[in-house]
Amino acid sequence: SNVVNIHYEKEELEGHRTLYVGVQMPLVRQSHRHHRPRSQKHRKRERAKGAAPEDQGSPSLWGDTPSQRVQFILSTEEDEQHVPHDLFTELDEICVKEREDAEWKETARWLKFEEDVEDGGERWSKPYVATLSLHSLFELRNCIIKGTVLLDMCANSTEEIADMILDQQNQSSEFDESMREKVREVLLKKHHHQNEKKRNNLLPIVRSFADVSKRQPDLHPLDKPGEGSCRALAPGEAKNGVNHDTSPMDLSKCCGLSFWGNCLKIACCVQAELHFMKKIPIGAEAANVLVGELDFLHQPIMAFARLTPAVLLSGMTEVPIPTRFLFILLGPEGKAHQYHEIGRSMATLMTDEVFHDVAYKAKNRADLVAGIDEFLDQVTVLPPGEWDPSIRIEPPKNLPSQKKRKTPGLLDDSASHRKPEKHSGPELERTGRLFGGLILDVKRKVPWFWSDFRDALSLQCLASFLFLYCACMSPVITFGGLLGEATDGHISAMESLLGASMTGVVYSLFAGQPLTILGSTGPVLVFEKILYKFCKDYALSYLSLRTCIGLWTAFLCVVLVATDASCLVCYITRFTEEAFAALICIIFIYEALEKLICLGETYPVHMHSKLDFLTIYYCKCEAPTHPSNETLRFWESNKINVSAIAWGNLTVTECRHLHGEFHGPACGHNGPYTPNVLFWSCILFFSTFVLSSSLKMFKTSRYFPTRVRSTISDFAVFLTIVVMVLIDFLIGIPSPKLHVPHMFKPTRDDRGWLISPIGPNPWWTVLAALIPALLCTILIFMDQQITAVIVNRKEHRLKKGCGYHLDLFMVAVMLGVCSVMGLPWFVAATVLSITHVNSLKLESGCSAPGEQPRFLGIREQRVTGLMIFVLMGCSVFLTTVLKFIPMPVLYGVFLYMGVSSLRGIQFFDRLKLFGMPAKHQPDFIYLRHVPLRKVHLFTLIQLTCLVLLWVIKVSRAAIVFPMMVLALVFVRKVMDFCFSKRELSWLDDLMPESKKKKLDDAKNEAKEEEVTLTMCLGLDLLLQIQSMTGKAPPSARTPSKSSL
């Protein structure tokens, strides 16, 4: 082969700080058949000439470590031919013995983790973390040092690669021309892959037809003309690398069977390859590791080659991707296991993120050795007597980041404490202008507006919308019913549906964070009860006074937006938001169980009944023996003749309407015992919870393809509701159903859709309404912003930004509209919002075998919230369908939402530590850096605050609940005196500090950066001087044993 000297320009030398002279670059051979080997003297001269610059390697300082060398190599500028790609690595092995035909057989492959061909050869093993022997790694290092290393080799076929590698071998009496031809023949043997075995097992009959013509070549599916860049090779002709054409006569002799047989085989093979190709990232390249034992060899042959550019080699790789790297290890027989382990070590190194990049950017042998040494520095050795090497380690759920290995100056977390991150982003910085924050929010969200609709084109959004529609309907209707009872029907279910639909639609269209779901809250209901009782006692118009309070509240919220008051949200740390979120989740769970228990009063059960007396149990309606004054007035106003009524023939509803009484052994307190309903409701309740949880976790099961599992998981709650409704309909037990208003009109006939702020009330009530409006403003602000903080957590990886000011402004506008129309007020609902976010989580779709899907973020869009509230407004016209939904099923959905929202709340993880011995405690990161007693103290303070919030929430003082939530911020500020800044940075978010403290920190950081810059400039100057001399210290040539 021809040898050329590559001359680097001055800019390249300064960029790489390295001097290269006479690097051997093999070119394409002109002829492979008539090859004339060079003389041994000539080859030795060339090897000696190329060894000097290769040994010099990249310049480094005296005593530098492999890690520093690798970081220097990775810091060099990339060109088009040395940009790292994802790698698929394949290990092929061969065993050549006398009078035995052999071929390369695929034994293992790597994308992220190792997969082996099982001993039976019928299937791939489960992916697992490769465990390597330290001895094989050192042997591999010796192979790179002593073997042939060809970087940026230009070749177009396997034959050219084999010739170039063999040209580098020293010719001696043990490796003469005949030996060279034998090795070349081995390198060109056919590669047998696992997918071919599957194809042969599936189509034995087709193969028998296809093999009728012995002359017809067994075409590889990617070797067909026009379908790939590689040539078709017949099995018997692959040894010599010669491709013979098939005559038309050969095809005609098959009577078409060979053609169709090959087509079926091609389709089967392509289908198998396409299934695995989905796991390989786009643009990936291959690294082929070839190891084996040859009975005619006396000395091993070792070679590492990097092709530039990558070449698609016919039949070399299992999948049709170009080969970039080639590692060959052929040796004498008797050491097959040793060769296998060295090949595994090489393949595992190629999947290592750091060595993978080094292999792409390496300029010489020394760079590759440095990459291996750096890998050895990171290796953890397990004692042989304390674990079983045959155990396959399962791939971890989360892979650690390798940035600290690539970037100079990054220390391990255990060595130094992380730098505290800023709790708040730029959206919570005060602008100092009226509506400055609101304007910035609008500018931040406008560029994403159309993408908020495009990004919703997914089945996941449909599943989220159907699930949350059912989840939102019941609380809105229930809240309306409770409000109707508290206000004597002035505001009821119809008004609640209309208010929720209007507010939700406008908020979803124009809010800064459309992932937030609006709903009704408990403190609002308490406030409505107190206000109605006050108006009733003082003969005031409830709706008019409520309108004044609502308008004042809306005005105050707009004032908060104008003054950038939402910037105060930065004081709401994880301590406050977790206490609030935990309380709301517990309330959801408690109310779901409470509503189920309340069904026992509506549908009583005949306790301690005797089966033998079932024939004589009865419960009938009778006239009341001692009617109350209310009953007498009812009879008189409706002109009811009590004596003329056949009380015994009345139904339960008619008896209750006429104020009758139930008598008999089968009667309860409020009517006859109801058989089966309560127990059937319990079955529906818990079945809904269990089935929803199981289907949601179905994504991680082992059954069905990934797409099916993902779809079932996305539609988990909706499928559960459909299944439960069908079962309830088939069983036929009269369980309580969802009741939706069927007419679009106000609940009371004496009110309309527009309410006057004054009405019959005195004029001074307009001014007096300002006092309760202040309390409502705090309530709205805290509920809205705490939920917004939870939704906008950094863990959710939101990319489109948030808009605290814009969110509050839209809530204020709709609060004013709802007040004028006499509709309930709606703010951000914590549990519904968390559930909405969880239902839209994005995970990586194409993952390597064994690799867990990575969390990518949230599907941020406006369509799901919009469709939820649009359909909610149309529910009046869907009563024929909604009346079949059992209420216990919706209560089970509430329980599921409450329990699922608890996941990810650190408070409950810390709470469980109280009952765990130290040796059984999970390896939480904060336990490594904070004493356990301090963790328990932090948890106890948070638990005390949670209990106090619960007591206030369920007591008559519930109206001051928002004030108590606000008090959590001050409690957290006091904790700065009990915990150090470092401890709080692990257990919680750091609160904003004073302006003076910020200025001092900025000055200190500026000084540190100045010192670091000075050191870097000095190091850069030293490296440039060293590169000009062209001499490197001995440590750069060969890493010392101490570094290993």
Image (cartoon, rainbow, N blue to C red):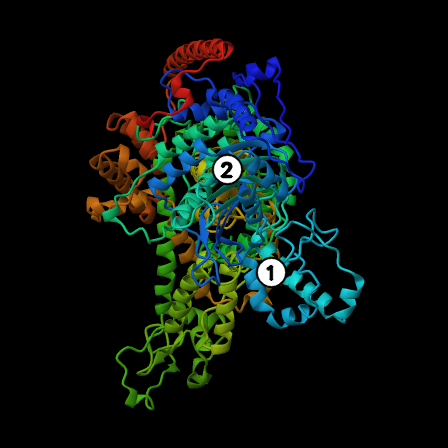
- Residue 716 visible, this angle: yes
What residue type is disc 2 on? Ala
Q: Nearer the viewer, residue 951 or 800?
A: 800
For badge 1, the amino acid type reads: Val
Q: Which residue is mark 2?
A: 303
Q: Quadrant of residue 63?
A: top left
Q: Is residue 156 left or right of residue 378?
A: right
Say what secondary structure mark 1 lies in: helix
**Circle 2 — which element?**
strand
Q: Are marks 1 and 2 in contact (CB under 8 Å)?
A: no
Q: Nearer the viewer, residue 138 or 46?
A: 46
Image mark for residue 876: 1
Answer yes or no: is residue 859 visible: no
- Give the percent coordinates (x, y) of residue 565: 47, 27
Using the numbered discs, state the Cα–Cα distance from disc 1 to disc 2 in whole angstroms: 76 Å
Above or below residue 922? Residue 1015 is above
Quadrant containing the C terminus in the rendered view: top left
Residue depth check, mark 1 versus mark 2: number of the one nearer the observer: 2
Dot placed on the residue nearer the N-terminal end, 1 or 2: 2
Q: In the rendering, at what x and y percent does residue 823 appear?
A: 54, 48
